[in-house]
Image (spheres, helix red, strand yellow):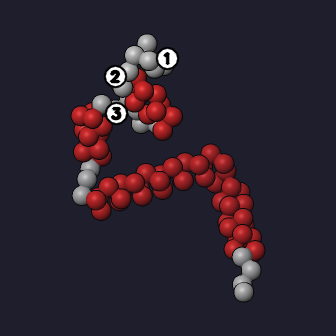
Amino acid sequence: MLDASWLVAAVGGLVIFAVMRLGFKGLALRLLRLYKAASLVWLRLRGLTPTDVVERRVVTGMSQCVQPITRRFCLLRYLPSTSNPLIA
């Protein structure tokens, strides 16, 4: 059975090299750009555009409930329940 410690060491070495070359801020910006590009490719594969996603959020009323934590409270706010103490 192969030991995975070499993989951990390789990834750690790449992270250290990237931090030394780019700095923490540069590495974070590169990772965010990579995430954005991957998200756009994923949307394109699904046949959507970023505008389509925004329009869908606005139509469903979820445009202000993007984050998972706030989504929970937004859904609680729109539920028709008088016994819910979170609804003002």
Q: Is residue 19 above or below residue 57?
A: below
Residue 77: image quadrant is: top left
- Quadrant in which the C terminus appears: top left
Mark 2: give few (<14), some (14-19) or many (20+) Cα within 10 Å: few
- Three-letter residue code for mark 2: Pro
Q: Nearer the viewer, residue 80 or 21?
A: 80
User: Which residue is pictured at 42% across the width and 36% down the height?
Assistant: 66
Going by the picture, which residue comes out furthest to the front?
A: 83
| Relative image position of residue 44 (x, y in whole percent) | 29, 58
Q: Secondary structure at mark 2?
A: loop
Q: Earlier in the sequence, mark 2 or mark 3?
A: 3
Instruction: Return the disc, 1 or 2, that comes first in the chain's sequence.
Output: 2
Identify which residue, 66 or 33, lies in the foreground.
66
Image label count: 3
Kindly identify the residue that appears in the image at 48 percent across and 38 percent down. 68
Amino acid under disc 1: Pro
Specify whether 43 is left or right of 9. left
Q: For residue 17, say whether it is visible.
A: no
- Name the residue tied to disc 2: 80
Rendering coords of residue 9 (x, y %): 74, 70
Q: Secondary structure at mark 1?
A: loop
Q: Residue at x 35, y 54 (%)?
A: 40
In the rendered image, which residue does mark 1 sit on? Answer: 85
Please state, as top left, top right, bottom left or bottom right, where the N terminus lies in the image: bottom right
Residue matched to label 3: 62
Q: Where residue 48 sits: x, y (%)?
A: 25, 53
Q: Marks 3 and 1: which is nearer the front?
A: 1
Q: CA distance from mark 1 to mark 2?
A: 12 Å
Marks 2 and 3, how far apart in space?
16 Å
Q: Residues within 10 Å of mark 1 (few under 14, many from 20)?
A: few
